[in-house]
Image: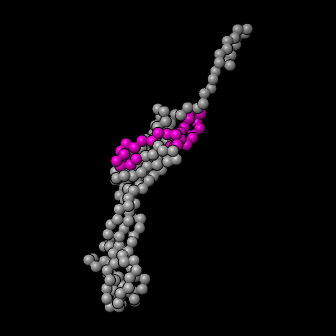
Amino acid sequence: TIEAKFGNISANTNLTVTPPELVSIEISPTTASFAKGTTFQFNAMGTYTDGSTVDITDSAIWLSSNNGVATISNNPGSQGLATSNVQGPSTITATQGTISDNATLTVTPPELVSIAINPNMASFADGTTMQFSATGTYTDGSTENITDTVTWTSSDAVIATINNSAGSEGLATGE
């Protein structure tokens, strides 16, 4: 109750203090780049009228400006998780009520995650050759023959050498 008094005269009114209200949202990071075939977690912090900050990642509504490039989850347990689809840019928005913030993401080309050598185990006669090949697997699940782009080495050049010359990449020679 609020009272105003002057001498013997007074007036009263009721005052109710409500919970703090959201005044701004800040997405972190504000810019992100990640490879096609991967995911990236965005977070949202809310600032309130009393100066407090609260992680509102799980309660914000998330939106991608270009779902073809990347989608962003509003599913329980994965809110703010962006999933890349194709290379390109998109704007990510986190909204709660009428308050929102934006972040920029760029989906980059898929990145190499593993190399498989074929044949996996080999034996061949001294003085002969054997061709090896290398297949790369990328973040988006794609594979590519990378025989001519990897650097080939032999752990013991006295037993076998392996070629890196153009047109002969991966060709092993028994010494």
User: Which scheme is used to colour this image of the protein?
Assistant: one colour
One can see residue 42 in this view = no
Measured as percent of width and height from the top left, residue 129 is found at 31, 85
Where does the N terminus fall, quadrant-wise?
top right
Q: Is residue 79 magenta?
A: no
Q: In the displayed structure, does residue 6 sit left or right of residue 65?
A: right
Measured as percent of width and height from the top left, residue 51 is found at 58, 36
Q: In the displayed structure, does residue 120 sit left or right of residue 42?
A: left
Where does the C terminus fall, quadrant-wise?
bottom left
Q: Residue at image x 34%, y 53%?
A: 87
Comparing 171 with 14, the one in front is 171
Q: In the displayed structure, does residue 14 sit left or right of residue 86?
A: right
Q: Residue at image x 60%, y 27%?
A: 18
Measured as percent of width and height from the top left, residue 160 is found at 37, 86
Count of numbered circles in the view: 0
- In the figure, 107 relative to 147: above or below? above
Q: Residue at image x 31%, y 77%?
A: 169
Measured as percent of width and height from the top left, residue 101 is found at 45, 39
Q: Which residue lies most toward the right here?
A: 8
Write the start and end of the magenta stretch as one range: 42-71
Q: Is residue 52 magenta?
A: yes
